Image (cartoon, rainbow, N blue to C red):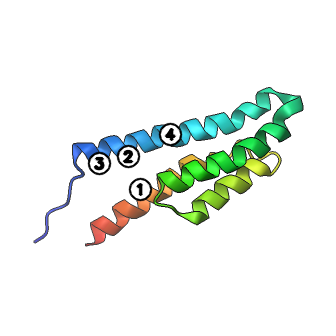
Amino acid sequence: MSHPTHPSKKTEEIKNLKLLAAILIDLIGMVSYLLPGASELLDAIWAPISAILVFILFNRKLSWASFTFLEELLPFTDVVPSATIAWYFHYHKSNKKESQH
Protein backbone atom coordinates (compact mmCIF):
# COMPACT_ATOMS: atom_id res chain seq x y z
CA MET A 1 0.00 0.00 0.00
CA SER A 2 1.54 3.28 -1.04
CA HIS A 3 1.23 6.42 1.00
CA PRO A 4 0.46 9.73 -0.66
CA THR A 5 3.53 11.88 -0.95
CA HIS A 6 3.35 15.24 0.72
CA PRO A 7 5.49 17.99 -0.70
CA SER A 8 8.16 19.30 1.60
CA LYS A 9 7.97 22.78 3.03
CA LYS A 10 10.79 23.90 0.74
CA THR A 11 8.98 22.50 -2.32
CA GLU A 12 5.82 24.38 -1.34
CA GLU A 13 7.81 27.59 -0.85
CA ILE A 14 9.36 27.26 -4.31
CA LYS A 15 5.94 26.54 -5.82
CA ASN A 16 4.49 29.64 -4.16
CA LEU A 17 7.43 31.82 -5.17
CA LYS A 18 7.03 30.68 -8.77
CA LEU A 19 3.33 31.54 -8.60
CA LEU A 20 4.20 35.01 -7.34
CA ALA A 21 6.79 35.41 -10.12
CA ALA A 22 4.25 34.26 -12.73
CA ILE A 23 1.66 36.74 -11.48
CA LEU A 24 4.24 39.54 -11.54
CA ILE A 25 5.25 38.62 -15.10
CA ASP A 26 1.60 38.84 -16.15
CA LEU A 27 1.01 42.11 -14.29
CA ILE A 28 4.06 43.73 -15.89
CA GLY A 29 2.72 42.61 -19.28
CA MET A 30 -0.60 44.30 -18.54
CA VAL A 31 1.03 47.62 -17.59
CA SER A 32 1.22 48.54 -21.27
CA TYR A 33 -2.55 49.14 -21.19
CA LEU A 34 -1.89 52.07 -18.86
CA LEU A 35 0.28 53.79 -21.46
CA PRO A 36 -1.84 53.85 -24.64
CA GLY A 37 0.70 55.45 -26.98
CA ALA A 38 3.59 53.23 -25.97
CA SER A 39 1.82 49.89 -25.58
CA GLU A 40 3.12 48.26 -28.77
CA LEU A 41 6.70 49.30 -28.05
CA LEU A 42 6.49 48.10 -24.45
CA ASP A 43 4.99 44.80 -25.58
CA ALA A 44 7.79 44.31 -28.11
CA ILE A 45 10.35 44.88 -25.36
CA TRP A 46 8.57 42.80 -22.71
CA ALA A 47 7.68 39.80 -24.93
CA PRO A 48 11.17 38.28 -25.13
CA ILE A 49 11.93 39.10 -21.48
CA SER A 50 8.75 37.43 -20.24
CA ALA A 51 9.35 34.43 -22.51
CA ILE A 52 12.85 33.95 -21.11
CA LEU A 53 11.57 34.22 -17.54
CA VAL A 54 8.82 31.65 -18.17
CA PHE A 55 11.33 29.38 -19.92
CA ILE A 56 13.61 29.47 -16.87
CA LEU A 57 10.82 29.19 -14.30
CA PHE A 58 9.09 26.16 -15.76
CA ASN A 59 11.79 23.61 -16.57
CA ARG A 60 12.88 25.13 -19.85
CA LYS A 61 9.60 24.37 -21.62
CA LEU A 62 9.82 26.05 -25.00
CA SER A 63 6.07 25.62 -25.51
CA TRP A 64 5.18 27.81 -22.51
CA ALA A 65 7.85 30.36 -23.37
CA SER A 66 6.52 30.57 -26.94
CA PHE A 67 2.95 30.92 -25.70
CA THR A 68 4.00 33.78 -23.40
CA PHE A 69 6.02 35.45 -26.16
CA LEU A 70 3.12 35.37 -28.62
CA GLU A 71 0.60 36.47 -26.01
CA GLU A 72 2.69 39.55 -25.29
CA LEU A 73 3.19 40.41 -28.96
CA LEU A 74 -0.35 39.92 -30.25
CA PRO A 75 -2.68 42.88 -29.82
CA PHE A 76 -5.47 42.71 -27.22
CA THR A 77 -4.08 39.58 -25.57
CA ASP A 78 -2.29 41.18 -22.61
CA VAL A 79 -5.21 40.27 -20.38
CA VAL A 80 -4.39 36.57 -20.83
CA PRO A 81 -2.29 35.55 -17.80
CA SER A 82 0.02 33.27 -19.78
CA ALA A 83 2.72 32.89 -17.11
CA THR A 84 0.11 32.04 -14.47
CA ILE A 85 -1.47 29.52 -16.86
CA ALA A 86 1.99 27.99 -17.38
CA TRP A 87 2.41 27.75 -13.60
CA TYR A 88 -0.97 26.06 -13.22
CA PHE A 89 -0.30 23.44 -15.88
CA HIS A 90 3.26 22.88 -14.69
CA TYR A 91 2.13 22.05 -11.16
CA HIS A 92 -1.20 20.46 -12.07
CA LYS A 93 0.52 18.04 -14.43
CA SER A 94 3.28 17.32 -11.87
CA ASN A 95 0.76 16.61 -9.12
CA LYS A 96 -1.29 14.40 -11.42
CA LYS A 97 1.79 12.32 -12.37
CA GLU A 98 2.83 11.96 -8.71
CA SER A 99 -0.61 10.79 -7.62
CA GLN A 100 -0.68 8.12 -10.34
CA HIS A 101 2.48 6.41 -9.03
Q: Residues within 10 Å of mark 1 (few under 14, many from 20)?
A: some
Residue lying at 50% horizontally and 39% vertically, measured from the top left: 21
Mark 1 or mark 2, earlier in chain: 2
Image quarter where the C terminus lies is bottom left
Residue that badge 1 annotates: 91
Rounded to the nearest whole Å, what is the CA distance between mark 2 and mark 3? 6 Å
| Left or right, residue 93 beside residue 23 | left
Mark 4 or mark 1, earlier in chain: 4
Residue lying at 69% horizontally and 54% vertically, measured from the top left: 69
In the image, which disc is placed on residue 11? Answer: 3
Residue that badge 2 annotates: 15
In the image, which disc is placed on residue 21? Answer: 4
Q: Residues within 10 Å of mark 3 (few under 14, many from 20)?
A: few
Rounded to the nearest whole Å, what is the CA distance between mark 2 and mark 4? 10 Å
Rounded to the nearest whole Å, what is the CA distance between mark 1 and mark 3? 11 Å
Task: Give SS at disc 3.
Answer: helix
In the image, which disc is placed on residue 13? Answer: none
Q: Are marks 2 and 3 in contact (CB under 8 Å)?
A: yes
Q: Residue furthest top?
A: 34
Image quarter where the N terminus lies is bottom left
